[in-house]
Amino acid sequence: MPRGRVDVRTDLEEVFRGNYARVVAVAARVLGSRDQAEDVAQDVFLSFGRSSVPAGEAGGWLTVAATHTALNLLRSGRRRSAREEIAGDGPAVAPDVADLVITGEERSSVRAALARLPHKQAAALVLRHSGFSYAEVAAALDLSPGSVGTTVRRAESVLLKELNRHASPE
Amino acid sequence: MRHPSEGVLRRLVDEPAGVPDDDRAHIASCPACLRALETARADAQLVGSALGTSGEVDTDAAWARFSAAAAAPAPAPAAFRPAAPGRRRWATAVRRPAVAALSAVVLLTGAGVAAANDWLPIFQTEGVEPVEITSTDLVQVPDLSAYGELQIIEEPEPEQVADAATARERTGLDVPEVGELPEGVTGDPTYQAAGVVSATFTFSAEKAAAAEGADLPPVPAGLDGSSLRLQAGPGVAAMWAQPTGVPTLVVARVGAPTVDASGGVEFETVRDYLLSLPGLPPQLAEQLEDLSEDGGTLPLPVPADLVTTSEADVDGNDATVLTSRNGLFAGVVWVEDGVMTGVAGTLSADELLPVARGLR
């Protein structure tokens, strides 16, 4: 059913509650800061509330919007956020790979590298690590499906170079 | 056969079913490919960990914050308040040096162009998603609060109005009238109006030093404690949308933003000093350098990987044409007699330029 722009969607609360944690996680993947990620999430849900995106497509839409918005914010504020990370977080253990301990410093250098990547490359990486399939990444970023793997791999290589520089200084 | 590419190996890590059978057969029997596959797998895992986050979110609290902000605009924080709810959260998110400088560029370029930055992320999500303008996009002042005291003097709430006549009554600006709508744009537009936003900014070397977190470059004589008056607006816009609500064409007119120095310091001095701060990304610095006090040039804070720019003539004015690299979005912006006019839409530049030239 076509519908015009409305100020408040009736399904907004349901979509918000069902997706908030995931949207914050996507933005936090980019920003490394939960506070900033929650700010991004608030903004993304506002945009969603003004949009006519069908509720059934909300999850994907919100993930892509959070990725772009967080990357834009990361770029514009990357010096500062890197500093905050160094000052703020201690070592953190990734939940799924218990033996990989990433230090706060490494996290901030990964974010700095992410901010320097071409926007599309960074977005492909984040979307992939947020659970998007290759076909979904391709559709969201207007990439050819065959090039998603290469794009993601390239982004990972750049990020790991940053990590290695800190993990094993010459 | 040739070894499959790194991209194929990378996909094999995540989606084996997406990799052609002959590639999989090759990899399974090729020691070099198997080694490369393991490296790709380990790298993916390590990056996943580096990007990983932990901690719970409080969805109830977040929803309370969200619904409060959406329903009843919060009172202005002491330092700075953007013009509408959509921006409010950024006030806390972006009060950072580099972003303050970005916001200054946004002020000095005005609605049509600055908004492209905000549209694109949304626009990209669905391929043909919104070229959307809200009244918030019309008029903004920069968040310079990290560098001194920013005091909002007037900030009328932007709003949707019934028709062009009401918009003119509120702002004194004529909504540009489109001569002939491009193909695919139909129906009646909705109108937005925003009054003049003005603020004074008093530079503080102490705050700037705190914001930069490092030694400041030498502060020019007279800059500390000097004030600028920033003004943006008024602005009006007409927006056409598809029945689904996806905007197709936006025509906006805004009083070109102005900056007055009142403390005996030239605007250029302040601008050049901002440019000398290490927090400024090089691309933004270039854009700031292009600025002139009369607002006659349009530096463009748009992501170069998403948008290309070119020049065009609109009724004797130098106009800037923005085109998204995927060709789905374009905008045309120009300044005439201190009034900035912008036309944007999910159209090609070739379709937009006649609209721009045909405005009455």
Image (cartoon, coloured by chain):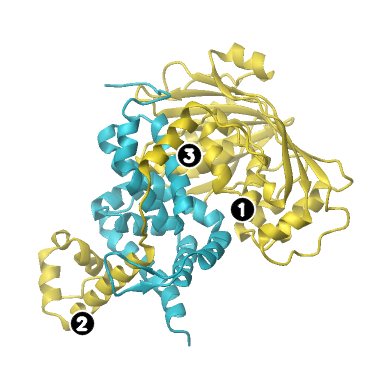
Q: Earlier in the sequence, mark 3 or mark 1?
A: 1
Amino acid type shown at disc 2: Ala
As rendered, which of B248 and B100 lies closer to the eye?
Answer: B100
* Residue beneath disc 3: B119
Identify the element where label 2 is drawn.
helix
Q: Position of residue B75 (x, y in %)?
A: 60, 32
Local packing at callout 2 (Cα closer than 10 Å; few below 14, some 14-19, many 20+) is: few
Whether pointer 3 and pointer 1 mark residues with C-beta atoms closer than 8 Å, the reply is no
Whether pointer 3 and pointer 2 mark residues with C-beta atoms closer than 8 Å, the reply is no
Is residue B20 visible to the viewer in this orientation of the structure? yes
Local packing at callout 1 (Cα closer than 10 Å; few below 14, some 14-19, many 20+) is: many
Horizontal side, residue A104 vs residue B143: left or right: left
Image position of B230 with respect to A101: above or below: above
As rendered, which of A110 and B186 lies closer to the eye?
Answer: A110
* Residue beneath disc 2: B32
Instruction: Give the spatial CA distance, label 2 vs label 1.
Output: 48 Å
Count of all numbered marks drawn on residues in the image: 3
Marks 2, 1 in one chain: yes
Identify the element where label 3 is drawn.
helix
Q: Earlier in the sequence, mark 2 or mark 1?
A: 2
Q: Colour of chain B?
A: yellow
Q: Name the residue at 36% across, 73% down.
A: A101
Instruction: Give the spatial CA distance, label 3 vs label 1.
Output: 22 Å
* Residue beneath disc 1: B96
Image position of B262 with respect to A67: above or below: above
